[in-house]
Image: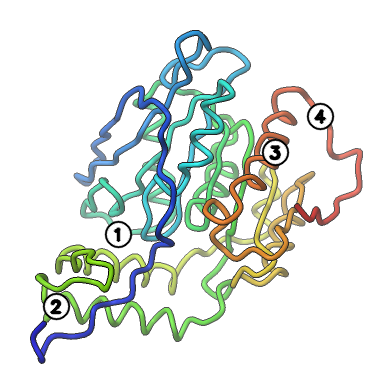
Amino acid sequence: MSNDAPALPERHVPRPYARPTAPLDRRLQVKTPDGARISAFCYAPAADAAVTANAATPGVLPVLMLHGNGEEHGIFGVLVDALVACGRPVVAVDSRAQGTSTRGTARLTYELMADDALAVLDTAGLARVHVLGFSDGAIEGLLLARDHAERIASLMSVGANLSPEGIPGNDELAEAAGEWEAWTTAGDESALYEDGTPAPSRRQAAQMAELLRLMLVEPHIEAESLGRISCPCCVMAGELDQIPADETRLIARSIPGSRLAFVADADHTLPKVAPEAVLRELLVTIAEAEQGVDWSQFPRSVQRV
């Protein structure tokens, strides 16, 4: 690496993680009005399960998975495999400017990425789905359930926040964005990380810097607006999440009839560090939607899972 080149920026995604091994039924590429190409991956159970990811069988709606900032759909690998193994199709999206999806020209917002997810559903011919959203994907899930209730059967919101102030440590986040921005102008693209992973290209660094900056200025969701969410919902976070527990409680308290779950001794990256806990609560939420369990009859409480 040149002496004048900046230090390699710290990688943002929670690697390593187990990617899906379930059969890929098909891959979609959805072109948006501003020129982005959004990739979505449809995983289907075996043929004898009588259900596919592009034609939902009554009572077996697919799960739409939306990942976190700077990641790709592979973060849900364990969950994809588990759902497909029990006969549930999955549609997992690589969000705009992440994974294999491209940037487009529109201003990057969570509302825009939620619209991308709707476009994926339209292209796949899916009128209604369950949603599992993690981190940024959980923010998008809240927007979908609030603004497009007819499309969302249930919502599993993992590690969401309602405003930039909902994530402490903005100074560290701004510093990380600055490191990625420095790489866009003077980074040595031939460099390697200690584990041999190639350095990011300057284009990749620019996208990562923009994604990090997004968390400094968005989202702006009024807690009161979540009262419009009518589907069964579980709001989950790790007990050691950098998002304050009060933020998670506020989200759950604002959604009528929602359940609240904290995972003991776990950080923000629940799909990686506690997929079994996420799966358990996801299946309960799906059952509530499909089998009519009325959780409003029970007192809301923190579930330690």
Q: Secondary structure at mark 2?
A: loop
Which residue in the structure is indicated by mark 3?
A: 230
Q: Please report whichever mark, 1 or 2, sits nearer to the chain's N-terminal start.
A: 1
List x then y, in percent, for residue 205.
22, 69
Q: How far is disc 3 from disc 2 in space, using C-alphas?
A: 48 Å
> What amino acid is found at the position of numbered circle 4 in the picture?
Val
Residue 107's disc is 1
Q: Earlier in the sequence, mark 4 or mark 2?
A: 2
Which residue appears at 67% of the width and 67% of the height? 247
Nearer-N-terminus badge (4/3): 3
Whole-Å distance between the Cαs marked 1 and 2? 25 Å
Cβ atoms under marks 4 and 3 closer than 8 Å: no
Looking at the image, is 299 positioned above or below residue 269? above
Real-space Cα separation, disc 1 to disc 4, in angstroms: 40 Å
Residue assigned mark 2: 187
Q: Which residue in the rendered view is the most extreme toward the bottom?
A: 3
Q: 282 or 274: which is nearer to us?
A: 274
Q: Nearer the viewer, mark 1 or mark 2?
A: 2
Q: Which mark is residue 293?
A: 4
